[in-house]
Image: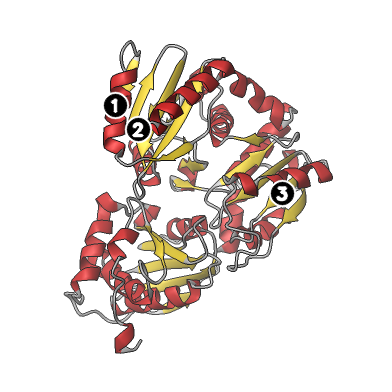
Amino acid sequence: MSESEQKLPANLASAFKAYDIRGRLPDELNEYAAYRIGLAYGELFGPGKVAVGRDIRLSGPTMVAALTRGLLESGCDVMDLGMVGTEEVYHAVAHQKLKGGIAVTASHNPADYNGMKLVREDARPISADTGLKELLDFVQSGKEPTVERKPGKRIELDGKAAYIDDLLAYVKAVDLRPYRIVANCGNGSVGPALETLREHLPFEFTVLQGEPDGEFPNGVPNPLLMENRQLTADALAEAAADFAIAWDGDFDRCFFWDENGRFIEGYYVIGLLAQRLLRDHPGAKVVHDPRLYWNTVDVVSRAGGKPVMSKSGHAFIKERMRIEGAIYGGEMSAHHYFQSFSYCDSGMVPMLLVAALMSETGEPLSALVDDMIERYPCSGEINRTVDDPDALLKRIEDEYAGGANRVDYTDGLSIDHADWRFNIRKSNTEPLVRINVEARGDRSLLETKTKELLRRIEAS
């Protein structure tokens, strides 16, 4: 790296988010920053074996090379996993009992972004509260490691077989029905893992966009975008499939469609997974976020479990799960966390558990979610740009808190009335507010209150 290249981006601090590092290249993140992050990791967390993997982005190999150089100079051994999903990094850390891990990924962000998700031993997340701020300080300081250490070694590690074996432990393949499944990989990192996994399952897959491609030839791999959903629904209809699933770029989130082509909000998938896991773990705790929760509390309670609310975000959910010993944690944003997966999120385990639940009940996916959708209709997450999010939240509280059954500040502002409730929270990175509304069995009320809230927000 030449002297002219040894400059940090002017906007580096903006790439350090609450739970990860993520920014546009090269003005928020570059190779020199990656090198310095490697040095900082070894300085702050000590030497040891660190798993490193990357997603499909074209900038991935050079960013990994720079990160690796920093880690090696700090005394860490680098276990290079190559191109993998984020959960494969988590798995390698836990399975190999490593010091930590770093996934070089920007998930569903545009192609000119990259970033990192960092964990310590046992795949414990490193967030702004547990090390990211100190990492940024060291990176920007220009300091060198305080202790001179013997340089580490880079070792290629193929963790795919052990990862697939552990996935298969979630189900009994012989008990699964031979479902037809449409799987949209979005040209992300999931393709190779799916190809290996499918060899052990009785399913007939129709795979869309299965080739990993950092050019994003079919758009950003983000199934939450409305424009990205129709292709999957159309392929499902053409294949007469039993359900469809799609993943984001690093496949730590997954999204479902039922046999009728209906997109299933992640909120209701939480209910499905909680039901399935509580069958084998009666009385266990289930952690959920506060954005949408009435259905989750109802399903978990009726299944004999104990619902526990946590602030949104993977670092908070994982920490609360460990404290509570929870069997499962779910966020309506389609992150699903499993105690048996080192309390980490997986985009593959939900596919297996949903198929197992369908096989056990003999019910189609639509029948498994219809009652939840009818009992607790929801708006899905709606984003709006506002000039002053804090002032808006205060005004909304003043207008809606009167007569409420519950006002909660676990994450943003939640206000529960008898028959409807909402959560409104600020974005960590943009002048946005994110709104979620749900009702008790009354879709008309849901639509009326959602429109009412949006009018008041847009008038601010």
Query: Which residue does the numbered mark 1 point to in the structure image?
Result: 395
Where residue 230 appears, x then y in whole percent?
70, 45
Where residue 88 appears, x then y in whole percent?
52, 58
Q: Nearer the viewer, residue 283 or 90?
A: 90
Q: Nearer the viewer, residue 278 or 35?
A: 35
Circle on res. 231: 3
Give the class, few, some or many, for how many residues have Cα within 10 Å of label 1's Cα (few <14, many ≥20): some
Nearer the N terminus, badge 1 or badge 2?
1
Nearer the N terminus, badge 3 or badge 2?
3
Residue at 22% across, 60% down: 134
402 left or right of 112?
left
Give the class, few, some or many, for how many residues have Cα within 10 Å of label 2's Cα (few <14, many ≥20): few
User: Which of the image's four quarters has the N terminus?
Assistant: bottom left
Q: Nearer the viewer, residue 244 or 404?
A: 404
Q: How many marks?
A: 3
Alpha-carbon span between mark 1 and mark 2: 9 Å
Q: Amino acid at mark 3?
A: Leu
Q: Amino acid at mark 2?
A: Ser
Where residue 145 appears, x then y in whole percent?
20, 75
